[in-house]
Image (cartoon, rainbow, N blue to C red):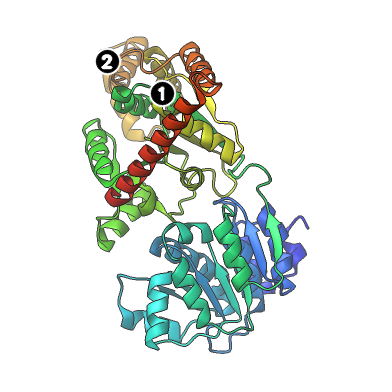
């Protein structure tokens, strides 16, 4: 099947798909939709941004009876994702008369219950959904149940809640599980809640989107801020997310970038719901070009036009890396993931690269001259694309009385160029030769210098140190 017409959807649904600009299904949609239409339970592994919502939403909408009951339940990890999934399903289903309800914590029980009473599709986060089920405020008998971003829900500690939720759901149902990664825990959960599921895996050996170019830059710890600013100046992202490990790091970096003239907003777990919604709304609408966030705060964040993701520090585990960089390269677009790495993080980088199965390319931080050249190219492009209005032509005639055209153009360009300041030292970070030497030294260390006993003690120390860091990180994020 190569187009959505091949699925033979109902006429109103097919028209909604065309209105949304969908023509050719993505790989996960191409494989999953026929299986869902056949009534099969499903395990689908695909990275974020590949159209998973439509992969389960469209075939479910095709089969809804609109009999006045909740026929489909979609469980997602965060309130932001709940809102986004609900909006997308409503967009496709409104021409069919299908209503959706969104259920998550931090909002009025009464209003949510009213919406559920009139909905065909409910999109919910685990905590609030379980509260409603256990209290008896709602009784659900959906024909379709979807676990979306299942690995994120497990990472956030919702495994027990999910198991309990399924004790309140009918045994006769079609269950669909979507996940970017497929850990042992995910497979164990699937065995409990799915019946003879079909399997779709779009990732192969590479669990990241091949439209995302992955780069890393090696700097000393003290150079991390300067490297970030230089890379922002050079790459000129249209919209980007910078990931930090801790909440206090988000706040500090937000203030630092704001002082450098960037429109930056922070997002972390200490913010209340109104602050979170305001920040996300500003980022989506273009009111902020940079979002600085912790992993937990950004889970489920779905913004299609993010051009770059920056890892201010590497995450502790490969799964977090996959989720971070999956915020770019969405909806068929290309994206860039940039990691700023110190020499002490090389082993973490190798572990991530081996786990995700993709090539993370080494680069050197651009020097001032390279940034100037890139900015000049961008300036010329802006001039070519800018349309002049009548008022400007009047101003030009006035200036021509004082300057010849060449002098006038040179002065105007100088004004524009003077706003393009490049900050920091000329050279930041390691050269390619220095990076190669660091890799060689690490290989030699791994190859056996020192006795087996010493290596064992060193490895135990590293494991304990990593465990202490991880525990400390969990407390602070």
State which tag comes first along the sequence, 1 or 2.
1
Q: Is residue 436 above or below residue 170?
A: above
Side (left or right) of 289 relative to 95? left
Tell me where residue 60 sits by quadrant: bottom right
Q: Quadrant of the N terminus?
A: bottom right
Specify whether 410 is left or right of 140. left
Foreground: disc 1 or disc 2? 1
Q: Position of residue 270 (x, y in %)?
A: 25, 55
Residue 397 vs residue 126, the one in the foreground: 126
Q: Position of residue 108 (x, y in %)?
A: 30, 77
Please determine whether, in this image, residue 242 is positioned above or below residue 37.
above
Give the residue drawn at x 44%, y 82%: 116
Question: Looking at the picture, does residue 468 appear above or below residue 72?
Answer: above
**Circle 2 residue:** 401
Q: Residue at x 30, y 15 (%)?
A: 425
The residue that label 1 is drawn on is 343
């Amino acid at each position: 099947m190569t187009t959505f017409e091949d699925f033979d959807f109902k006429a109103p649904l097919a028209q909604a798909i065309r209105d949304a600009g969908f023509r050719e299904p993505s790989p996960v949609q191409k494989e999953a939709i026929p299986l869902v239409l056949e009534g099969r339970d499903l395990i689908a592994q695909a990275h974020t941004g590949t159209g998973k919502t439509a992969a389960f939403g469209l075939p479910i909408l095709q089969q809804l009876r609109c009999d006045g009951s909740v026929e489909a339940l979609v469980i997602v990890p965060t309130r932001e994702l709940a809102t986004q999934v609900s909006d997308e399903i409503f967009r496709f289903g409104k021409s069919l008369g299908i209503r959706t309800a969104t259920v998550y914590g931090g909002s009025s029980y009464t209003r949510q219950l009213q919406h559920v009473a009139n909905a065909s599709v409910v999109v919910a986060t685990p905590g609030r959904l379980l509260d409603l089920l256990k209290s008896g405020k709602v009784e659900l008998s959906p024909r379709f149940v979807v676990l979306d971003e299942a690995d994120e829900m497990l990472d956030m500690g919702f495994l027990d809640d999910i198991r309990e939720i399924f004790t309140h759901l009918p045994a006769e149902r079609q269950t669909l599980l979507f996940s970017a990664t497929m850990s042992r825990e995910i497979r164990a959960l699937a065995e409990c809640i799915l019946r003879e599921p079909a399997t779709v895996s779009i990732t192969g050996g590479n669990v990241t989107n091949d439209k995302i170019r992955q780069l890393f830059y090696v700097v000393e710890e003290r150079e991390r801020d300067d490297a970030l600013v230089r890379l922002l100046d050079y790459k000129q992202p249209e919209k980007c997310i910078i990931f930090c490990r801790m909440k206090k790091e988000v706040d500090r970096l937000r203030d630092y970038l704001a002082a450098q003239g960037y429109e930056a907003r922070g997002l972390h777990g200490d913010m209340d719901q109104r602050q979170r919604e305001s920040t996300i709304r500003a980022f989506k609408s273009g009111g902020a070009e940079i979002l600085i966030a912790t992993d937990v705060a950004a889970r489920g964040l779905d913004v299609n036009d993010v051009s770059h993701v920056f890892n201010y520090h590497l995450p502790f585990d490969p799964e977090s890396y996959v989720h971070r960089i999956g915020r770019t390269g969405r909806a068929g677009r290309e994206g860039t993931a940039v990691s700023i790495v110190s020499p002490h993080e090389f082993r973490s980088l190798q572990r991530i690269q081996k786990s995700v199965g993709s090539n993370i390319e080494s680069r050197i931080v651009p020097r001032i001259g390279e940034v100037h050249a890139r900015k000049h190219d961008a300036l010329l492009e802006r001039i070519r694309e800018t349309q002049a209005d009548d008022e400007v032509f009047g101003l030009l005639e006035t200036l021509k009385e004082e300057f010849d055209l060449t002098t006038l153009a040179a002065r105007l360009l100088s004004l524009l160029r003077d706003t393009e300041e490049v900050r920091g030292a000329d050279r930041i970070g390691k050269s390619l030769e220095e990076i190669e030497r660091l890799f060689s030294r690490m290989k030699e260390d791994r190859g056996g210098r020192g006795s087996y006993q010493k290596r064992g003690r060193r490895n135990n120390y590293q494991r304990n140190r990593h465990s202490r860091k991880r525990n400390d990180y969990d407390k602070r994020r």
